[in-house]
Each structure stands twice: as structure tokens, then as C-alpha cells.
Image (cartoon, rainbow, N blue to C red):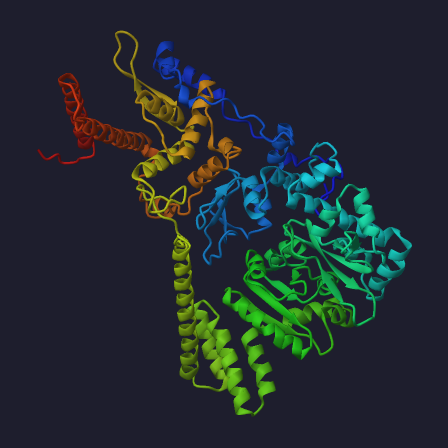
Amino acid sequence: MDPAFGLQTGNKDSHPEHAERAPLDERCPRVYQQTCAIKIGVSIGVWFALHPRKLGYLRQPPTTDIYPMIPQETVDQIMNAAVIEEVIGDYVELKKSGSSLRGLSPFTNEKTPSFYVLPAKGIFKCFSSGKGGNVVTFLMETEKASYPEALRLLARRYNIEVQEKERTPEEIAAASAKEGLANLVGWAAKWFVDQMRDTESGQAIGRSYFAERGFRDDILERFLIGYSPDSWDALATAAQEAGYTADKLVESGLCKQREDGSIWDFFKGRVLFPIRDVTGRVIGFGGRTLQTDKKVAKYFNSPESALYNKSRVLYGLHLAKPEIVKEERCFLVEGYTDVMAMHQAGVTNVVSSSGTALTTGQISLVRRYTKNITVIFDGDAAGIRASLRGIDMLLAEGMAVKVVLLPDGDDPDTYAKKVGSDAFQRAIHGDAQDFLQFKIKLLSQEAGADPMKRAEMIRSVVTSIAAIPDAIQRSVYLQSSASQLKMDEKVLGTEVAKVLHEQSKAEAKRAAQSSRNGLLRGNITPPPKASIPPSTSQGLPDVEGLSSKASEREIIENDLIRALLEYATELVVVAVEGEEGEGPATMEVPFAELVIHRLEREGIDIEEPTNQAVVKRFSSELDHERILTADQLAQDQDTRVQQKVAGALVQQHVLSPNWSQRHKIYPVVERDQLMSLLEDSLRRLHLMDLRKLASDVAAKLETADLSVDEERDLLSQKVKITREIQATLQHFGTVILP
């Protein structure tokens, strides 16, 4: 499938290096049996004693394909081909951190990276939001897609054909809004390209316009530039013939509706610049008129829809990502042709806000890949002043901002063609200057010797400095700005402090108002989540992003399930009954097998729903003599289970190897304490069950209508439970008072 158009173009082989890994399953029981028979002579009966019939409530049949539109074989092919770090790398700048990759969360506006990817496991975990899972889960979260939609996005990326029946117009209309719009907009993008390439009017009008501006054919193809004929219904007719409805055409913004119900082409007679998301999929259009009539709007953009949100899109970002990461810098220009011109000049780490005012959403897109941004201004002074507010927003988001000012009357397009590619690249790299220095110089020239204008200029500079979130950077800029303005640094610092104080008061006022509104609505807005999650009783990150409201039982269950997932195939030594005439013997069994066996033997129920689902998965596989691994479970269709696995396997904090390698200090690690962890967890859960049982017995004893025999039985149960509670507490070293 073509990732841009979203159209099926044929099947291609997936990457052979991502072939399916052999599961760790049926080999294990045979190895264990042979080892036990040779080493300790344990009888077959003893071996099978560790495989009791599983309790009915733990049984679960193998999961079937619950999404019949995509065959399971195709789902498997997609999952085997998908490389999680490649896909997430389209959204997040990932850097190596031990065996994992780390970056800023795409789900929250954080400053310190808490988003982790484990390529070997095929999972991610975001500690600031609590989200986690596999590559499908990630696309479901970021693209707000359903499970089938996320699979189709991956299929398009890796050129995997998804065999689906040809859908009728009725079925297209019944599809989800976002998927239906994506199909339609992708089809329209290809239709526009065909119109410019294959029609006489497209060549004479559309192609000649770009030829006059010096754009090469390969650049037009790279950006999927198209043309809409100067006809009221050319697109509408072709789209309806292809099976798309008039309602969808209007919803997408490709057509407008008249009062009589008929529709007409919104972009008629314009050249089209497809707007694409970070994956390269077309989601909207910018259309430029070729008329000289000043009454006609120069540019039209697609209206916002379920597919297109202009505040969350940057033109050219899908092409710029690799070079932005490589160069650790992003260039920001004004328009579509500016981006194209810079590509033609050999500069590809460039994006545009598509003619809209810069938004925090757009800034966050850039910040995923770099904090260094260079804004290229043309020589229009009025345009520069209008853009200064956007620059302050960049500073507020922690970006390092530089500015390049082109000669008056030139934009990146005209200047690159005037001086050539080499000179243009030297200019944008060598002439870049710090934004605040540029702003002071610009406003000082405008203010001249006028005291009032100069005071206003200083206040504007103070606002920019106050926008910088980092205190050290703010202090450095204070020093350099005071020197450039020839002012006392203390005076400038006092003014910055005033601005910060006013901002703090305004923020507190907004928070108080929000709280009052919440109370009026019958709810209270929760405080923002901390960037570092709460810790469990074991001092490890909370695998589910638990709040302080998590019950003690849930915390204990989470620790046990985390250990089960992380060390499922780890062999642990257990004592077993030896042959007749021999003493006790030992044998090695997988930790997962031992956990499930102990839970069943001791009648301990796992109560938290997701933890319960994980136990069921392991138990079901053990019924077939297979050991389930966390890698396999990470591909589970249940997103709750994926989240649990991600939280268990991705650790935000790891033990430094310097302890053992440099200092020769060998801390006790959890891997060596699995039996102790299991015993401790089971005893705590058992103690909770006993206390609940004791509470139930006490409640029954309060009943007035008890017979003597009933009361005697209850008292006997109470004594027995109390003794068992005391014995369990002694295990933890608790002092029992008489």
C-alpha cells in the first residue's frame, strides 16, 4: 500500500530480518523431565504432581480472531514485520539508554524523558502517563485508531497487502468517520496528481506554474503536488463514481454544499499541496489559486475534521524527521513552497506551519525530535513583528531558538534560486543568530531615541526572557540582554521577576477557577500526574501507574505478577518427595509454573481484573504443557494485558554496572530472591484472605438468632482462624500481644 495515498498497490515481501522468533514452549517440559530423571531420579508421578488439574475459573480457551475483517495470518505477518523503534521513531526522538531507548512522552507535555521502548521485547512504557503496550497499542493511542485501523497503518508502512473484500458505497458510508475520511482524502490526493500529470489543462496551467518558479519534477513528485480542474464538479463526479458519498465529500472539505443540496469542488482551479501526518498519510490539502484577481483568496486549507487538526500538523515533517534527528536542528519557514524550495536546495530538515499561527501542539511535534530550531524570516518587517509572539511560544516550550533574516524582498524560495544551493546553505547555517539578540537589535532600530518606544521595547524583551522555563538559561539571557540594552542587570532582573510573579498569580487563579467549576459540576479536577510514578512496596515503579488509592492487595498482586512476567522461564529449585527409601530431593521448574501451581494449591484468588487475566493466560498454556513468555503476552489483543506486560518489563531505573565492575560491590538482585518474593507475596495475600474470613465470622456471631451448635461452630472457626493469622504474622516478625 502507498503510505501517502492509503491505496492498495500490491503485496511486497516483508523484511526477512524480522522473521518470527521461535516460541519457547514445547521444548521446555521435555528438557525438564530428562534433567530430573538423570540428576535426581524423580518419578514420573512426582513430576506430574506439579501439574494438577487447573481450576475451572482459571480455564480460558485460546483467543480467536475477534477482528474478522483482517485474517489472523495477516495480523501475524504485520506483527512480525513491524519494528517498534521504527514506528515510534516517527513520533518520538529516541536515544539509547542501556538496552532500551528513551525519549519525551508523546502523551504528556513533559520536560524530562520518561518514555521507554524495549526493541528486544517489542513494547513501550510511558511512566508519565502510565500507558504501555506493543506497536499496535501505540498507534491506537497516538492516532486514536481502533485495533483494525492501527493494523492497517502498519500494513501500509511495511507494504503488506490486507485482503479485504471490495466495499460497496453503503459499507464505505457505514465505516468509521476517520477511516472513511482517510480513504477518501488518499484517493483525492492521487486524483489531483493524475490531473496535473495526465491532463492537458493540468500540464498547461498547473505544471507550467511550478516550471516558471523553477521547481523540478522530482520535487513535485516528492510532495505529491496536484491540480484541481477549473470545474464546479470534476472531483465530485469522479469521487461519487468511485463509490464515495456526497456527505463524505462535504465532511472532508473537498466539496461544499449548496442550498439545493448539490455539491461543488472546493479547490476548483487551484494547485494542491497535500498535507501529511508524521507517517506520510495525506490528511488534508492546501490549495493555491492561479488567478490574479485580488478578491479571490490566495490560499484555501481543508477545514478541520476527524482526520485533520491544523494545530497538530506541520507541513513536511514526515520527510524532515530523519534529517532533523541527524542534524539535531529543525528549520521553520512560512509556506508550502518555502519547504519545497529548501528541499530542492538540499536542505530537508525543514517544516512549515502551513500558513497558520504557530501552536503549542506544533511545537511539541518538533520537540519530539530536537530542541534546536532556526526560524527563517523573509525581509518583510511587518511579517517579522507578527511572528515574534510565536517565537516567545517556542522559548516557553524550552526550545533553543535561532533566527535567519533573509534580504528584504526575498523568501527561501526566491533567495535559494538567486544565490544557488551552496550559498543558500552557507547563509542559513552561518548567518543564524540568537533570537533575543535579533529581537533587541530589530526593536532597537524601530524605537530609535524615543523613550516611550524604547521602554515598550524593553518590556517586550522582558516578556521573552520570562518565557524561558529554565532558570539557568534565563539568567544567562538576562546578563547578555542587559549588556546589549546597556541596562543595569538588576533592574532587568526585577522586571522579569515581576512578570513571572504575575504569571504565577494568573496560573493560580485559573487553577482555583477550574477547581470551583469542578465542584459546581459535582466533580473535582484531579491534580496533574507527577513525572515520576508512585512506587510499590518493593521500591520499583508501579506497573500500572497506581495512585495512592491503590489497595494493599492490589500492590502485592502487582509485584507478584510483575515477577511472574519478568522471570516466567527462570528455573527455580524446589523440594520434592524422593523415591521410596530415599530422602527429599530437589528439582528445577520454571518460575511461572511454580507460581500458578502455588496459587491453585493454596486456593488464593487474584482479584484485580488485569492481573487475573494474566494468570488465566499462563494457566491456559500450562494446561498444554507450555510456558508462556512475556514477549508472547506483549502481543495479546487485550490492551490491559499489554499495558501490564509493558509496565513489568520496562524499568525506568536500573542498577548501575559500576557497583560490581568498578567497586566490586554485588548488591542482592531480585532474580536471586524469587522464592522469597513468592513466599512473602503468598503469605500476605493469604493473611488478607484470613482477615476477611475472620471479619465474616465475627459478623455472623453478632447475629441474634444463632443456635447453640451454630455458635459453637463459629467460635471454633474463629479460634482456628485467629491461630492461623498469628502463625502467619510470626513469619513477618510481628510481635503478638496477648
Q: Which residue is depicted at the point 48% across and 43% down?
A: 132
Q: Residue 131 in the image: x percent, y percent? A: 47, 45
Indicate whether 618 appears above or below 309.
Answer: above
Closer to us: 17 or 49? 49
Hey, which residue is sitting farthest left in the picture?
738
**Would residue 293 be visible to someone looking at this image?**
yes
If the image is split into quadrants, where does the C terminus sit?
A: top left
Q: Is residue 410 left or right of residue 530?
A: right
Indicate whether 208 appears above or below 108.
Answer: below
Q: Residue 677 in the image: x percent, y percent? A: 31, 33
Closer to us: 324 or 583? 324
Q: Residue 7 in the image: x percent, y percent? A: 74, 42
User: In terms of image quadrants, where is residue 286?
Assistant: bottom right
Labels in figure, total? 0
Q: Is residue 402 left or right of residue 462?
A: right
Q: Which residue is depicted at the point 57% across and 44% down?
A: 139
Indicate whether 133 appears above or below 354.
Answer: above
Hey, which residue is sitting farthest front in the picture?
260
Q: Which residue is depicted at the point 74% across and 77% down?
A: 409
Q: Residue 535 in the image: x percent, y percent? A: 34, 46
Hey, which residue is sitting farthest right in the picture?
200
Q: Which residue is depicted at the point 53% across and 33% down?
A: 637
If the image is split into quadrants, where does the N terminus sit?
A: top right
User: In terms of image quadrants, where is residue 41?
Assistant: top left
User: In terms of image quadrants, where is residue 569?
Assistant: top left
Closer to us: 361 or 100? 361
**Would residue 43 be visible to someone looking at this image?**
no
